[in-house]
Amino acid sequence: MADIQPTQSTNPTPPEAKPTSEKIHLTIRNRIRVLFDDDVKAVTSKNDTGIFDVLPEHSNFISLITSPLIIRKLDGQKQEITFNNGLIKVKENTVHCYIDLLSKENKPQVPPAS
């Protein structure tokens, strides 16, 4: 009778799960200066499809946003920022918000209809 030896698995051990982050880095700026630059738990905003939250490990995207922007800080406090117009960019666990970039002086002028 043949001696049967256990075979070694050819499957490598699975890599350890990537630790999920519990925070994201948020930078908010207007035309003049940086208004906020810190790690946060979440950011809530609104676009033409509705209200949305940006949480750690969120997928990458860019969207025009409308006021307000709600920041949930690491200590549990909430901060709300109101603005006239804005854009949000989410990439690799960082969030950049650009608000009030269009001032009345910089809005495109539409010529009167003839």
Image: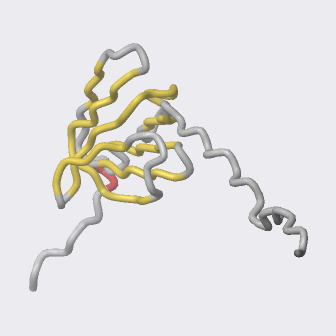
| Left-right relation of 11 to 87 | right
Residue name at image x 41 percent, y 43 percent: 97
Vertical placement of residue 13 versus 33, above or below:
below
Snapshot colouring: secondary structure
Vertical placement of residue 113 versus 51, above or below:
below
Q: Which residue extends farthest bottom?
A: 114
Q: Which residue extends farthest front?
A: 1
Total residue callouts: 0
Q: Closest to the observer: 102 or 111?
A: 102
Residue name at image x 18 percent, y 60 percent: 49
Vertical placement of residue 64 versus 2, above or below:
above
Quadrant housing the N terminus:
bottom right
| Left-right relation of 12 to 112 | right
Snapshot quadrant of residue 111: bottom left
Q: Closest to the observer: 88 or 23?
A: 23
Residue name at image x 43 percent, y 20 percent: 74
| Left-right relation of 106 to 22 | left
Q: Closest to the observer: 15 or 26?
A: 15
Vertical placement of residue 86 versus 29, above or below:
below
Snapshot quadrant of residue 112: bottom left
Residue name at image x 23 percent, y 43 percent: 84
Q: Closest to the observer: 21 or 41?
A: 21
- Residue 34 x %, y %: 49, 31
- Residue 78 x %, y %: 29, 20
- Residue 66 x %, y %: 22, 48
Quadrant housing the C terminus:
bottom left
